[in-house]
Image (cartoon, rainbow, N blue to C red):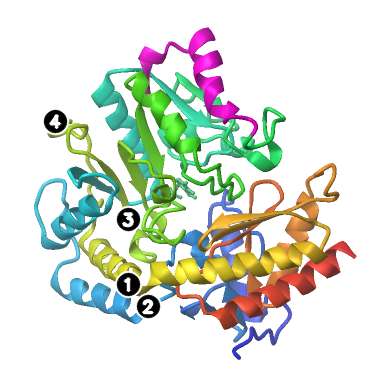
Amino acid sequence: MKLPKIKTPLPGPKAAKLINIDNRRVSPSYTRDYPLVAEKAKGLWIDDPDGNIFLDFTAGIAVCATGHCHPKVVSAIKKQADKLIHMSGTDFYYTSQIALADKLASLVPGDGNNKVYFGNSGAESVEAAFKLARWFTKRELNIAFFGAFHGRTMGALSLTASKVIQKRHYNPLIPGITHIPYAYCYRCPYNMSYPACGIECVRWVEDNLFRTTMPAEEVAAIFVEPIQGEGGYVVPPSEFHVELQKVAKKYGILYVVDEVQAGMGRTGKMFAMEHFGVEPDIMALAKGIASGMPLGAMVAKSDIMVWEAGSHASTFGGNPISCSAALATIELLEDELMENAEIRGKYMMDQLRNLQNSIECIGDVRGKGLMIGVELVKDRETKERAGTWRNEVVLKAFEKGLLLLGCGENTIRFSPALTVSKEEIDVCLSIFEEVLLEVTS
Ligand SMILES: Cc1ncc(COP(=O)(O)O)c(C=O)c1O
């Protein structure tokens, strides 16, 4: 069984030298939880410049869906690079962008009558969705959720309500956005319990918000993650999206679904919203879409994406190499990896629930497929958040060669490549358990 190998103190001498230069030359706005310097990687395994080997359960923040440097993706990238690197879909046509648009349009839940706009990132996909929703509805107001992360460009940031540091000194942001509580049942914002609550968090929108401060007929869109990502891998109850979309439809409000983190096979279905039986009006995609090549896509129903030529575009958006990587990625997802995500995700979740029976600080285990969150608490009764323990777990796991990331205030996220094997999950969980016991003893 392959195991992580740590041969130097971390960071090792070569990594330390690089980090030193980075400290002097790279934007200090980046957040690095631990000093990993990635030199090369294959599948879930990353080598640093000092010969240390790490097991990666982050997939580069849920991006490398097919694992690092999957041979089929690398081959597609190389082939495309030999043929055409750039032409700009804004002004010209080219094969790989057209092929990918055709594929994505047919994949999105619904009748397949969709159109695709291409950007380079998640924020750009959300930004495009924001603009299209305004353009189409000619309405000025929008709804988004506390805990949501939609990106950091000014429009996407205005919809984001994740951490205050992401907003500090950037006001004024785009006006007219109201944030409301998400269906976070483990910590119900209304102090109710599911299912007795009758999905109060949706009822509240119509009964309170639309009656008091927000005229429903002025709302362009509801922006929502199918499962909150950065907010803590929060899975809403099964009826949440259907009920919320019913309210949206009643008032002509668009349902804009941000699948940037949850989409592209990660949850065991191509799009996480398929678990909830909802057809979005507009969908934002990025991260896992091209296995690490920069690409964002905004897919909308054809009768909604009716903006005129010149109203929105991007020079690099839908770059030929990124589109070819995406086509190779989607083929792998359809052939085997979505199924693997479902099977391995279930195994991992079962194992984590077993661990929860014996380890007191595991307050909640939740997720779908390989989008799994473990919320740490100081006390199961009071649910006091164990944010410091969470940070220590992430750091100590790194020191033992396991790469993890946090999300929310006190949740560990497991977002490995969808190629993950049972053996790799076993290695991850044995390190995780060891570290949890060390930190909380
Ligand atoms: C749900 C969601 N939307 C949007 C974004 C922004 O994506 P990017 O960092 O590619 O701009 C993220 C990034 O984490 C995300 O998780």
Q: Is residue 220 left or right of residue 241?
A: left
Q: Decide: is 267 above or below 403.
A: above
Q: Residue at x 26, y 54 (%)?
A: 107
Q: Decide: is 38 above or below 357.
A: below
Q: Secondary structure at mark 1?
A: helix
The quarter of the image holding the C terminus is: bottom right
Query: What separation in Å lies between label 2 and label 3 (alpha carbons)?
Result: 17 Å
The amino acid on which the numbered mark 1 sits, given as a three-letter code, is: Leu
Residue 263 in the image, given as x and y percentages of width and height? 41, 54
Query: What separation in Å lies between label 3 and label 4 (alpha carbons)?
Result: 23 Å
The residue that label 4 is drawn on is: 308
The residue that label 3 is drawn on is: 295
Residue 188 in the image, given as x and y percentages of width and height? 68, 35
Indicate which disc, 1 or 2, sits on the residue closer to the N terminus: 2
Indicate which disc, 1 or 3, sits on the residue closer to the N terminus: 3
Q: Is mark 1 within 8 Å of ligand 1?
A: no
Indicate which disc, 2 or 3, sits on the residue closer to the N terminus: 2
Query: What separation in Å lies between label 1 and label 3 (alpha carbons)?
Result: 17 Å
Residue 53 part of the magenta-drawn span: no
Q: Which mark is residue 70?
A: 2
| Residues packed near mark 2 inside 10 Å, few (<14), some (14 to 19) or many (20 plus) | many
Q: Secondary structure at mark 3?
A: loop
Q: Pointer 4 and pointer 2: residues touching (CB < 8 Å)?
A: no
Query: What separation in Å lies between label 4 and label 1 (alpha carbons)?
Result: 35 Å
Closer to the eye: label 4 or 1: 1
Q: Residue at x 44, y 72 (%)?
A: 340
Residue 179 in the image, given as x and y percentages of width and height? 54, 26
Point out the stretch of residues depicted in magenta: 196-220
Q: Pointer 1 and pointer 2: residues touching (CB < 8 Å)?
A: yes
